[in-house]
Image (cartoon, rainbow, N blue to C red):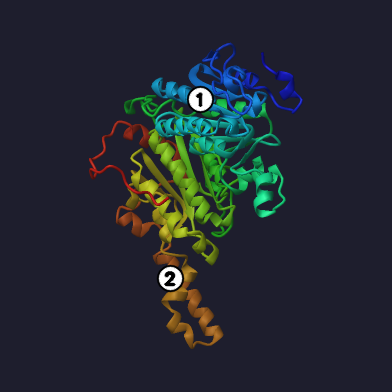
Amino acid sequence: MYQIEKQHAKGKLHAIERIQCLLDSNSFREIQSGVTNLEETFGLKPGQFPYDGVITGYGSINGRKVFIYSEDFTVIGGTLGKQHGYKIANVIKLAIENRCPIIGINDSGGARIQEGVNALAGYGEIFYYNTMASGYIPQISIIAGNCAGGAVYSPGITDFIFVIDDISQMYVTGPKVIKSVTNEDITAAELGGAEVHSSTSGVAHFRCEDENGCFAKVRKLLDTIPQCYSEKELAVKEFSDYTQNGVFRYEMDHIIPEERNKSYDIRDIIYNIADEDSFIEIMEQFAKNIVVGFGKLKGITVGFVANQPKFAAGALDCDASDKGARFIRYCDAYNIPIITLTDVPGFLPGSNQEKKGIIRHGAKLLYAYSEATTTKLNVILRKAYGGAYIAMCSKHLRADFVYAWPGAEIAVMGAEGAVDILFAKAMKNMEPGEKKSFREEKIEEYNKDFMNAKVATMHGYVDEVIKPEATRERLYADILMLAGRKMIAGVTKKHGNIPL
């Protein structure tokens, strides 16, 4: 029945093999296997394509139920006809009704041209149910081959997209169409391969070396995130069970360099806060100046949003703002507590960023944090300057608790820039030697008076200054304490208008 060898000849697994590799052993149950194409047009005959090129059903991953579909490229190139589309829409609908994740394994040449508008109707049904599922159940897309034309927009709506080296291809229009319209020569890999979408476009969330590695990552992710928005993920312990006799992470004292402008890897701090081997980074190769991902804190799933000093000094730009905002909104939809680790010098300056719309993109981050009602905890590690201080889950955006490590700097800008602006007139006519001495003196004064968390703490913008080694225990206690709270009612409205 299945043309398995045809896929193997291309170095790929067959649709049914992919399902079997991903799900728990012997857990898959196929549904609607008898559905096939109905239209008789352009030489196609009704019933010509078995299961209309897509295998649908349900099973389990690590004992937890999931629904799944897998497109079969050996059946008319995995193209989507009306019945193919309705089968996928139906399995998404079933996942919504059963409050569990939906996984799509995409390997399709796009709309089945022979079926015309009926193929488009199939896509429309899928997009509708993708949107219905969004924020209610996790939606995962695995790009395991071609994904062209209308086929890319369903993954585009889903929560997480996995791409595979030398296998995945995603594009709205393929190389041949581009050549005919713009006369541009480009390969499929250059246009929409795994590297492009994981590092440049930001479309993909996870990049994998091979199919089996991809399936392992999907299984780990689904073992970390909730099955449905209403899942009680925090019902791990009552607050009364909390004890501070946990393991302190003393090595955190030495991660941040003494030199204020020297870089370090923010992931070293995340690894020390999260349970061992629990951190799953998302969009690792895109917008590297911010790190987002899921981890466990004493068994509780949390989301991390952290500036990355290793890249662009951790400054916020257009892509980092988009990346952070989308992740925050996912965490909020599923009531996953958000831990923000702040070490940010500001929004990235420059004409390129202004022309790309840093105002609009930065506003997404502000909006996402402000709108989120899940638990929001912020630790200011080293510096928090200007508008970026506000944007990184400040008290002003209703963080539940904001902490600062000793030596953290909270200010409008760095001391050097502030002194150059504040004393520009005074230094204008000074001799070079006098100017240097005066400037150094004022920088020292500014550092002493303003480059610390003292003023923010006095006003309640920082709740406590804590030692690095106490961070993990403090955050855990906060999450337990805040788990059962009820929010004060906000403004009654249909919804806001996020600056997309």
Judging from the image, what secondary structure is the residue with disc 2 in? Answer: helix
Q: Position of residue 214 (x, y in %)?
A: 63, 30
Looking at the picture, does residue 362 appear above or below residue 145? Answer: below
Judge by depth and name the residue closer to the eye, 403 or 486.
Answer: 486
Quick check: 102 above or below 110? above
Q: Is residue 176 left or right of residue 83?
A: right
Q: Amino acid at mark 2?
A: Glu
| Residue 213 on image: x %, y % | 65, 29
Quadrant in the picture for residue 278: top right
Q: Nearer the viewer, residue 110 or 432?
A: 110
Q: Which structural element holds mark 1?
A: helix
**Mark 1 = which residue?**
88
Toward the viewer: 322 or 154? 154
Q: Residue at x 53, y 45 (%)?
A: 291
Position of 197 with respect to 118 (left or right) is right
Residue 68 x/y as whole percent: 53, 22
Of tags 2 and 1, the one toward the viewer is 1
Give the residue drawn at x 38%, y 28%.
234
Q: Residue at x 32, y 35 (%)?
A: 482
Q: Earlier in the sequence, mark 2 or mark 1?
A: 1
Figure quadrant of the N terminus: top right
Residue flagged by tag 1: what amino acid is it?
Ile
* Residue 328 at x, y percent in the picture: 43, 42
Which residue does the numbered mark 2 point to in the structure image? 445
Q: Is residue 312 visible?
A: yes
Question: Residue drawn at (55%, 46%), measured in percent from left and top?
Answer: 266
Q: CA distance from mark 2 to mark 1?
A: 65 Å
**Dot 1: within a 10 Å radius of its alpha carbon, few (fewer than 14), some, or many (20 or more) residues?**
many
Marks counted in the figure total 2
> Where 217 falls versus 156 (above or below)?
above
